Image (tube, coloured by chain):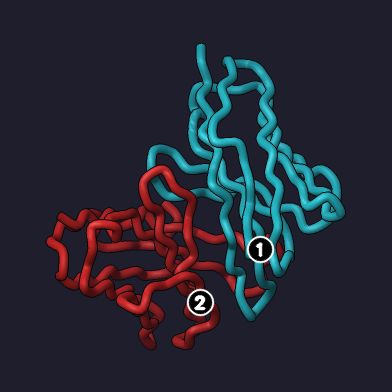
Amino acid sequence: DSGVTQTPKHLITATGQRVTLRCSPRSGDLSVYWYQQSLDQGLQFLIQYYNGEERAKGNILERFSAQQFPDLHSELNLSSLELGDSALYFCASSEQGAPTGELFFGEGSRLTVL
Amino acid sequence: GQSLEQPSEVTAVEGAIVQINCTYQTSGFYGLSWYQQHDGGAPTFLSYNALDGLEETGRFSSFLSRSDSYGYLLLQELQMKDSASYFCAVRDGYGGATNKLIFGTGTLLAVQP
């Protein structure tokens, strides 16, 4: 157990809909990272928040947005869903100043768009 | 652009040694990490190299050559439970700014009896 909690674990929805994925980082970690993993693909970096502020941005679609709240949990909002958005969405957190920069991943949210 | 290349699949037998290579081309570099992922589960950290050379952690070792933009993960005394996907990842930031990782495409390791 990494200490990172993601909900929901599974989500099935239809094209055009909007969903929200939630992540609680490990206790004490200020950074939250979102990654997308499509079938048989690597992990694609979407976005990072640090203590409530956006810190780094990857190839995140305009239809996707995220935020980090004062209690440090984060939400990833996916809208106008398309079939190609079906994927595993991982959240990770990291300890500031850790020499290895290790990311601790949650179990992921599996999104299926029908 | 940024890219990390790994072999897509590797097969080995129990008790053997296997090496998974990774070459990278990224705009920023603060180290090379390796992660293991079982069947779509949470990726877990295996090792990290910031400097050239070999790092050993039990049955796993990782090597880095920054001048060659190359690294590898060496798994010894393979066990069935080592069957998983292995990802190399470049650390694209350091310290308080970001520990963003750029991941490779992953190598599926199949360990056979």
User: Which chain is painted in cyan?
Assistant: B
- Residue visible at 16% across and 64% down in the picture: A15
The x and y percentages for residue B73 are: 69, 38
Residue nearest the observer in this picture, B96 or A59: A59
When asked about the image quadrant of residue A68, the answer is bottom left
Task: For mark 2, give the secondary structure.
Answer: strand
Extreme residue in the top direction: B113
The x and y percentages for residue A96 are: 61, 74
Residue nearest the observer in this picture, A111 or A10: A111
A55 left or right, relative to B39:
right
Residue density around tag 2, few if under 14, some if 14–19, many if 20 or more, within 10 Å: some
The x and y percentages for residue A93 are: 49, 67
Q: Is residue B38 above or below residue B1?
A: above
Residue density around tag 1, few if under 14, some if 14–19, many if 20 or more, within 10 Å: many
Amino acid on which disc 2 is placed: Lys
User: Which chain is painted in red?
Assistant: A
- Residue where numbered disc 1 is placed: B91
- Residue visible at 34% across and 69% down in the picture: A23
Q: Is residue B20 above or below residue A7?
A: above
- Residue where numbered disc 2 is placed: A57
| Label 1–label 2 contact, CB within 8 A | no
- Residue visible at 61% across and 75% down in the picture: B98
Q: Is residue B92 above or below residue B32?
A: below
Amino acid on which disc 1 is placed: Arg
Q: Chain of mark 2?
A: A
Task: For mark 1, give the secondary structure.
Answer: strand
B19 left or right, relative to B83:
right
Say which mark, if any, is on residue A102: none
Q: Chain of mark 1?
A: B
